[in-house]
Image (tube, rainbow, N blue to C red):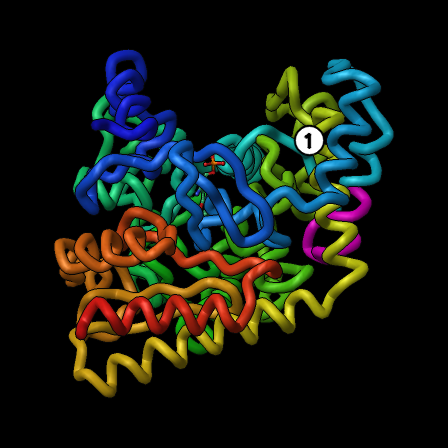
Amino acid sequence: MQNHSETLFDRAVQKIPGGVNSPVRAFQAVGGRPRFMAKATQQHIWDVDGRQYTDYVGSWGPMILGHNHPVIRQAAVHAAQSGLSFGAATPAEVEMAELICGLVPSVEMVRMVNSGTEAVMSALRVARGFTGRDKIIKFEGCYHGHCDAMLVKAGSGVMTAGVPDSAGVPEGCAKDTLTARYNDLESVKKLFAEFPRQIAAVIIEPVAANMGVVTPKDNFLQDLRELCTKENALLIFDEVITGFRLGLSGAQGLFGVAPDLTTFGKIVGAGMPVGAYGGRKEIMEMVSPVGAVYQAGTLSGNPVAMAAGLAQLNLLVEHPEVYDHLFALGEHLRNGLKQMIQCHDLPCTVTGVGSLACLFFTKEAVTDYQTAKSSDTAAFGAYFRHMLEHGIYLAPSQFEAVFLSNAHTMKDIDFLLHTAEGFWD
Ligand code: PMP
């Protein structure tokens, strides 16, 4: 007999492409069929068949305080009681803008949007408008959402599917996207030399978390900052994942590098559909209605979404010790996995920083797209299925991160390590 998840999937594939509303939810890369989820609280998630999992996806990052936090839920419910959307300015938007600008010093002005994709798409337009240049440098394996210009050598679901580019992206769009190698400053310098005064911006995930997790080498981000300044190009940090995760001022605070523009998503909306982009005032004043760069949104700054996001950010501000816990969990997980690799001489590598981690099924040190790609994805698939059967819900792809939340405990990590060990026994 089929269970509810299977029945739902059979129905879903008839009416929704692949049965999912985002390809990263499909289990194509790991084998099997997606589990349909019914509810979640703290570090746990339950599927429609009542199976409980410890969740290491956390809605792909937003649930940094664990699922269904009562304070955040109450804030959203309270806001909803006053109306779901007005399409007019609201106090919460002002509070949100002040809070983000207060926490992230490089952001002097900010605009709310509805997703990370929109944040990136808008930031690129502003960068082009501000510099009067067309070309953008991105890094192989970094994912910046699904706007046309960024679907070139992208990470995440694009990488998982083994599709380097997407159909439907006009050549004209892709031709202004140049790709460099992560952690390789020379590859960026080469592009600046080849296209003098044509590059509007360099966009990067300051910690790449869409080709698995790849951390920046010493000074890579600092050097990139200097290079962009020298070339009069803007530096854009895509902090959709790292923003408010690697600290209250994100990866830029952790590494001490100030970009010109930053994009946010995920945590800033606490699970509601929210993104944001911001940066230096003179750049952001290019945005309409002040400036000539058009960008708009019927539901942008939605009051329910702002209430949820503000509640989460305010909790993080009030409890900065959350980051100590998140970093300690991450250390414990990475160290435990490293020990296991050493003990059993496993063909694996561990990466990560803070509450982001990745177990790559390759012996190579993973520093960029090429080395990430050397992973044995079939072995990852078998590992994923083993973990799932033991109640551990990981992202269903080698090229994604483990997301830790404040609700996870050291005991949860011990159980994950114990279960992982069982895979090789
Ligand atoms: N940038 C980064 C770094 C991301 O990880 C993602 C999504 N995972 C995006 C942009 C796109 O965000 P969204 O899915 O909200 O459009």
Residue under the point 47% across and 56% down: 403
Residue under the point 40% across and 75% down: 334
* Res 101 visible: no
Q: Which residues are magenta?
A: 97-107
Residue 107, x across and y down, in percent? 70, 50
Q: Quadrant of residue 170?
A: top left
Q: Which residue is mark 1?
A: 305
Residue under the point 45% across and 61% down: 207
Q: Is residue 259 above or below residue 311?
A: below
State how many labels appear: 1
State the predominant SS element of the stretch in magenta. helix
Work out which quarter of the rendered image holds the C terminus and state it: bottom left
Residue 28, x across and y down, in percent? 20, 38
Looking at the rendered structure, the secondary structure element under dot 1 is helix
- Crowding around mark 1 (Cα neighbors within 10 Å: few <14, some 14 to 19, many 20+) is many
Q: Is residue 100 magenta?
A: yes
Residue 297, x across and y down, in percent? 62, 20
Left/right placement of residue 48 relative to residue 98 reads left
Q: Is residue 122 magenta?
A: no
Viewer-closest of 7 and 325: 7
